[in-house]
Image: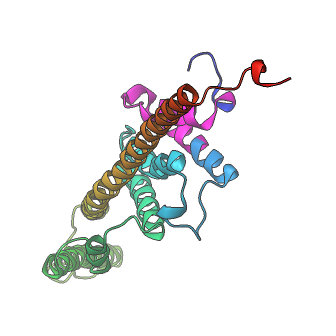
Amino acid sequence: MGGLAMEEMPLSALFEQARKIHLADVVKKGCEMFQKCEDMIGKLALFSSNETKEDISTNNLKYLLEPYYLAELTEKIIQDDRIPIVKASYAKLKEFFSFCEAMELVPDEELEASSRGGSGAPADRRALKIARFKRQKAVEAKLLEIKERKERRGRSTKASALSTPVESGEEDIPDDDSEEEREVCNEFEIQSVDQTFKEILRENMFLVTITSTIISQIIVIEFASIFISSVRLDLKKWVTTRLLGLLSQVATRFPYPTNQFYP
């Protein structure tokens, strides 16, 4: 950190340090730094919803990438339950995409792809829905079977208590339905989480593809600005040199009058 606390660092230094953090043991610290950057960007009002890329100062253009870098670091947080991490990263990527769309940084063809859904072909989405529906129906059927077995066990127990004959199929059944029910529910939950994870990742990949295009545009704009500034500086130097040369020639041809011409 160079001796400075995070609260004391200027935005540019804080942003650059956060940008370089990729090691797993400091990822959370990097996330905190980018969140602090986000707060500072908001307080400094660097961007407005009424602006487009033409209105943004070139020096501030890189700060548009803050949500993207935060999403990238968030994705690297290590914990057992990955779903909240992926969801948080996905939310930041969507925020970044929406803001860049407002800034008119997203190419038209990418916007068209986004409006079509962005998460794959309609046939793929339909197949996912069918697979999810089949899994749900299979779980419901299994739970119904367990429920019916429990009801038969209840009737069997009651019949035994009353010393009445027990109907065929209603004899004592081992009491393992509760465990089986839990296993069925757990399996369904695991499959649902896995499917959710895959869907979020699929959306993430689409947003990452668009993000790559946006970042390329931002880098091109930054380099173009640096090049133009360099050309302007060289042109200024050239003009200054030429003017000084012309002034020198004028001074040589028309020397400044000395006191001998004056009384």
Q: Looking at the image, is 74 positioned above or below residue 177?
A: above
Q: Looking at the image, is 97 positioned above or below residue 256?
A: below
Q: Looking at the image, is 139 positioned above or below residue 35?
A: below
| Viewer-proximal residue among 223 and 79 | 223
Q: Is residue 253 left or right of residue 189?
A: right
* x then y, percent, for residue 253: 53, 29
**Looking at the figure, which quarter contains the N terminus?**
top right
The magenta segment? 8-36
- Determine the residue positioned at 29% across, 56% down: 208
Q: Would you say residue 40 sits in the magenta stretch?
A: no
* x then y, percent, for residue 230: 42, 39
- Determine the residue positioned at 44% across, 36% down: 238
| Number of numbered discs | 0
- Chief secondary structure of the magenta portion: helix
Question: Colour scheme of this structure image?
Answer: rainbow
- Determine the residue positioned at 16% across, 77% down: 121
* x then y, percent, for residue 251: 58, 28
Q: Is residue 208 left or right of residue 254?
A: left
Q: Quadrant of residue 257?
A: top right
| Viewer-proximal residue among 98 and 166 | 98
| Viewer-proximal residue among 65 and 185 | 65
Q: Is residue 20 left or right of residue 195?
A: right
Is residue 132 at least partly visible in the picture?
yes
**Looking at the figure, which quarter contains the C terminus?**
top right
